[in-house]
Amino acid sequence: MEKSEFIWFDGEFVDWDSAQINVMTHTLHYGTGVFEGIRARNTEKGVSIFRLNDHVDRLFASAESYNLKIPYTKEVIFEAIKDVVSKNKLESAYIRPLVFFGEGEMGLLPKDVPVRVSIAAWLWGAYLGDDAVNEGVNVCISKWRRISPTSFIPLAKGVGGYMNSTLAKIDAVDNGYDDAIMLGDDGTVAEGSGQNIFIVKNNNISTPPNSTGALNGITRRTVIEIAKSKNISIEEKNLTVEDLKNADEVFFTGTATGVVGVVSIDGDDISNGKVGEITSDLINSYEDVVNAKDDNFKSYITLI
């Protein structure tokens, strides 16, 4: 990780290495926190953040789901996110707001435990590697199932829930793959370890519904909007592993990931083993949108 100079922590900027917590912090023990992943980009119109309002809204919704009462307004967090990019003089950045229970009474009930907020920003390149956009990625079907939506809150980005994703990611990489696809309790497809998933079949796009345990990703929603603007048929429906392997194209979406083609699953090529035509078109369109080149989506751009 390439450190930046400052982190916004509980309402003020502190040096990166001074943003520290006590080892008895509640979230370290019980995973009781929520977070967001946001990107800032250097566009022709200036440094901008994509769908910042949506990210802040989801952060607050996630916090509410886990009974974390953020001690700041949305407006304060919105401005702090912009400020952490500008204060660190970053033109391109990954931004990580984190809301968590601090030090207090130990135990599962965080009674009278303070809620703390940090916002870090740093330079972070392509999550799945620089070659992923052009070459695609090779993935496996994970032996780890996605946590059931009846056991967790899939619409919230909860800290503890990502232990599930970490198990899948580690296992995939240890076995020579770039990432993993996770199934739900019923054996249908949920999502990647940290990405939403789509398939293309006969020029129609499908993606699993949130009821599978998949996150209602902001990039997922953006790609759905882009596809509809191109009059490409797109629907939410349950998908099987067979649907994936027989698809014409498969791709991942996510803020860290962007849009990336999946070219093989469990060592079996998807179609010709290359990034597909529709996927490539969506990659290019998505890059135009997030880099403020498409005026149809200009309301999603926040200039810093």
Image (tube, rainbow, N blue to C red):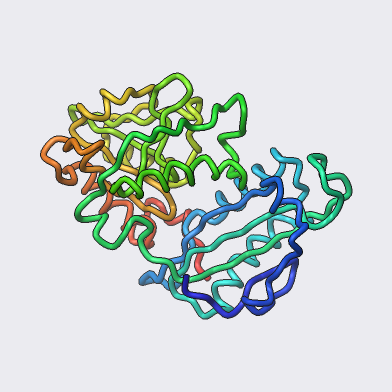
Position of 88 with respect to 74 (left or right) is left
Coordinates of residue 136 in the picture (x, y in percent): 23, 50
Total of numbered circles in the picture?
Answer: 0
Position of 304 with respect to 33 (left or right) is left
Say which residue appears at 11% left-offset and 39% top-offset: 272
Coordinates of residue 91 in the picture (x, y in percent): 44, 75
Choose between 40 and 23: the one closer to the eye.
23
Coordinates of residue 239 in the picture (x, y in percent): 34, 24
Q: Is residue 277 above or below residue 103?
A: above
Position of 253 with respect to 70 (left or right) is left
Position of 204 with respect to 160 (left or right) is left
Q: Is residue 50 above or below residue 13?
A: above
Q: As drawn, which residue projects farthest toward the left?
A: 272
Q: Is residue 232 above or below residue 296?
A: above
Q: Is residue 257 above or below residue 201?
A: below
Say which residue appears at 37% left-offset and 45% top-offset: 253
Q: As drawn, which residue projects farthest toward the top?
A: 186
Coordinates of residue 298 in the picture (x, y in percent): 43, 56
Say which residue appears at 70% left-offset and 62% top-offset: 76
**Which picture quadrant has residue 158?**
top right
Choose between 163 and 148: the one closer to the eye.
163
Choose between 182 and 29: the one closer to the eye.
29
Choose between 142 and 225: the one closer to the eye.
142
Say which residue appears at 60% left-offset and 40% top-offset: 156
**Which picture quadrant has residue 248?**
top left
